[in-house]
Image: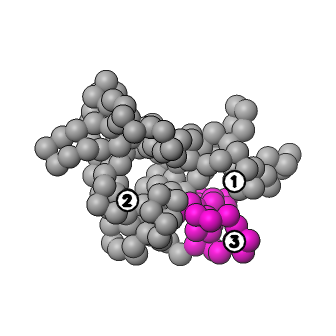
Amino acid sequence: MLFLMFQLGRDRYVLETGQVEAVLPLLATKQLPGAPAGVAGAISYRGRPVPVIDLAVLALGRPAEPRLSTRIILLRYPSGPGRDDLLGLLVEQAVETIARDAADFTTSGVEAGMPPYLGPVASDERGLIQWVRGEALLTPEIRDILFRQQATKP
């Protein structure tokens, strides 16, 4: 499998590239007043609004550093039964892909209390890499807030 690697702080994480629509440079987001914590705003992608989640806020409690390697990953997110929408993930150091077998990943042994989007881990010469489960990034409440408008369109 091919994975897109990124960092949260000093730790490395991966997303399976089959979920990725595009990787964009860091763009200014339109602020969404009253949005839940972790929602960085929205961008326009090919004429349609896409909500953007700052993964560093969700995982580390601080915004992603605005660097050249900070990217917005457009993820095909299952927003409802039989429907995918785009979700932007603001991440740091998204500059590398790796090929790994899914069987290389195993439970970390510390699943209790971890956010549901954090999956199994694999090891390489630089340390551990954790698989992020894109479909589990949002709570049902936040998913409904971000995708409610799209769901009500005919």
Give the answer, above or below, for where 101 lies relative to 9. above
Spatial CA span between label 3 and label 1:
13 Å
Spatial CA span between label 2 and label 1:
21 Å
- For the point 52% across and 59% down, the residue is 58
Q: How is the image coloured?
A: one colour
Residue sitting nearer the eye, 42 or 105: 105
Q: Which residue is mark 3?
A: 32
**Number of marks in picture:** 3
Residue 115 shown left or right of residue 153 in the figure: left
- For the point 31% across and 52% down, the residue is 12
Q: Quadrant of residue 120?
A: top left
Q: Which residue is mark 1?
A: 142
Q: Identify residue type, mark 2.
A: Leu
Q: Identify residue type, mark 3.
A: Leu
Residue 39 shown left or right of residue 145 in the figure: left
Give the answer, above or below, for where 65 lies relative to 137. below
Residue sitting nearer the eye, 104 or 81: 104
Picture coordinates of residue 47 (x, y %)?
A: 65, 62
The numbered mark, 3 or 1, whose residue comes first in the sequence reads 3
The numbered mark, 2 or 1, whose residue comes first in the sequence reads 2
At mark 3, the secondary structure is loop
Tell me which segment is drawn in magenta.
29-54
At mark 2, the secondary structure is strand
Picture coordinates of residue 29 (x, y %)?
A: 58, 72
Q: Is residue 24 something one can see in this rendering?
A: no
Q: Which residue is mark 2?
A: 8
Reply yes or no: does residue 78 show up in magenta.
no
Q: Is residue 10 something one can see in this rendering?
A: yes
Give the answer, above or below, for where 58 lies relative to 97. below
Q: Quadrant of residue 71?
A: bottom left
Dot 3 alpha-carbon crowd within 10 angstroms: few under 14, some 14 to 19, many 20 or more: few
